[in-house]
Amino acid sequence: MTINLLSDTVTKPTPGMLEAMWAAEVGDDVFREDPTVNALEAKCAALFGHEAALFCPSGTMTNQIALKVHTRPLDEVICDEMSHIYQYEVGGYAFHSGISVNLLSGENGILTPGLVETAVKPRFDWLPKSSLVVIENTCNKGGGSIYPPERIRSIRKVCQKLGLALHLDGARLFNALVETGETPASVGAEVDSISICLSKGLGAPVGSVLVGNQGFIAEARRVRKVMGGGMRQAGYLAAAGIYALDNHVQRLREDHTHARILAAALAELPYVINIRPVQTNIVIFDLAGDATPASFLEYLSKNGVTASAFGPQTIRFVTHLDVTGEMVQRAIGVLHAFPFGKQ
Ligand SMILES: *Cc1c(COP(=O)(O)O)cnc(C)c1O
């Protein structure tokens, strides 16, 4: 069986999850009559200590809705240059919301209150209005990096002082929480809105949830509709999400252990350099000298390992629910046998 390290989005539902989906009670969620979607939304709101939540087809949609509801045209969003909302959402901030982006260079995608404070623009007619800060925890392009808990609090203070909203792109938030030991509610208390992905490490096939207060989510529901994201019997998908939250959070630690084992093995290899610090389930590294991502990925693929290029010399491995300890050992065997310098 292929060892798929492409992304934690590649997981397939487990038998237990499929059973939960099969058994779901459903209705038309556009009329808010799907009891399972309602249960998932209530569960997420309560988990983060917020008033309401909204189930959406993707994390791109939950983020884009958050940008739209928190801003007005001619505003700007402040975020790290590695942010998903800037790198991988097709420039949707401009398309959907008519806003610009003010990019900061944090450490592996992690911002500081000082960086945020100096980025906020003064109010002049000729400047965009800084109205929103987006932080990403964990940061994908930063190698699965984690925000230290007190850091979010101090960024929050800057936002409050200067009148900016704070959105957390928490596509992989639970990967951070199982490492820091924080509760979802303690993070929820520090931000205005949160997006979480059920379809990454948590192992659901589809879906993300946006969390916030009543007024925010009411408006978000309208924006979801105009983006084409109103779903009908979505309870089958929401059931997978509920199952994932109940059963797949604590096991994320295993994925992190697997990522650390892979990183330790990579550190021994002559053709690998610049392994980014591994804090969660993502391993990013560069290939040295002659080894190109194309030849390396082709070799891996021929030997039953799938991964992706993440830059001109850069490779990304992601561990997840469908990667076992035995697969990690097999992948390491394949890595050791790469004919570096012998092509
Ligand atoms: C994956 C991801 C998203 C959203 O992705 P979708 O594929 O649209 O669900 C958002 N932010 C981060 C940090 C991500 O890794």
Image (tube, grey):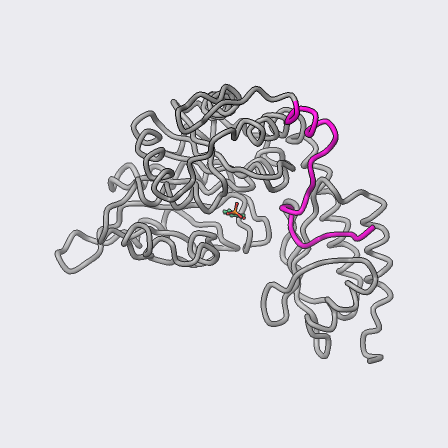
Along the viewing direction, whichever of 99 and 335 lies nearer the viewer: 99
From what the image shows, is residue 312 above or below residue 120? below
Along the viewing direction, whichever of 248 and 229 lies nearer the viewer: 229
Q: Residue at x 85, y 45 (%)?
A: 326
Left or right, 249 with respect to 184, comes to right
Asked if the magenta segment contains residue 15, the reply would be: yes
Q: Residue at x 57, y 39 (%)?
A: 206
Give residue 186's position: percent from left, percent from top. 47, 27
Q: Quadrant of the C terminus?
A: bottom right
Left or right, 120 with respect to 294, comes to left
Q: Residue at x 72, y 48 (%)?
A: 259
Find the magenta span and give its range: 1-22
Give residue 97's position: percent from left, percent from top. 30, 50
Picture quadrant where residue 228 is located = top left
Q: Residue at x 45, y 24 (%)?
A: 45
Left or right, 264 with respect to 311, comes to right
Give residue 70's position: percent from left, percent from top. 30, 41
Task: Find the residue positioned furthest to the left.
Answer: 125
Q: Disc count in the image?
A: 0
Along the viewing direction, whichever of 240 and 268 lies nearer the viewer: 240
Left or right, 164 with respect to 242, comes to left
Picture quadrant where residue 205 is located = top right
Asked if the magenta segment contains residue 283, the reply would be: no
